[in-house]
Amino acid sequence: MSVSVRIPTILRTYTGGEANVDVEPGEATLGGVIDTLEASYPGIKQRLVSDTGEMRRFINFYINDDDVRFLEGLATPTPDGAQISIVPAVAGG
């Protein structure tokens, strides 16, 4: 099972500048994808998930254009071929 993850500019220092990475998570959930990203790109998980295991408040995750906050959060299934987007929230006015 392989999924594609879009990496925002601010996190590309972890991926060697790569904007898109393909991963084969051991667990077919968003949490599994993040764990696989961490194994390949150490330090990235800390930017995405809090110490308590919750999604960081100002990071949004989309699986095939669906916001996981309205699905199952980190337990949201990631089907084979899914496109996952990591989108930092933008503040300002």
Image (spheres, helix red, strand yellow):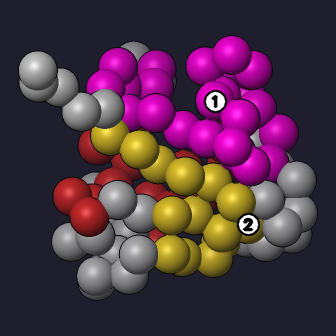
Is residue 18 something one can see in this rendering? yes
Look at mark 1 in the image and give the residue it sits on.
Answer: 67
Magenta region? 54-78
Examine the rendered structure and indicate whether residue 14 appears above or below residue 65: below
Q: Determine if the magenta segment contains residue 59.
A: yes
Q: Position of residue 55 (x, y in %)?
A: 45, 26
Q: Residue at x 73, y 29 (%)?
A: 75
Amino acid, disc 2: Val
Upstream in sequence: badge 2 or badge 1: 2
Q: Could you give the CA–CA distance between mark 2 and mark 1, rounded to whole angstroms? A: 16 Å
Which residue ends up furthest to the left in the rendered image?
93
Decide which of 72, 46 is in the foreground and name it. 72
Look at mark 2 in the image and give the residue it sits on.
Answer: 3
Question: In which quadrant is the C terminus drawn?
Answer: top left
Q: Residue at x 54, y 38 (%)?
A: 61
Which residue ends up furthest to the front in the rendered image?
93
Look at the numbered disc 1 and give the secondary structure of its residue.
strand
Q: Position of residue 86 (x, y in %)?
A: 47, 48
Q: Determine if the magenta segment contains residue 82.
A: no
Look at the numbered disc 2 and give the secondary structure of its residue.
strand
Q: Residue at x 88, y 53 (%)?
A: 79
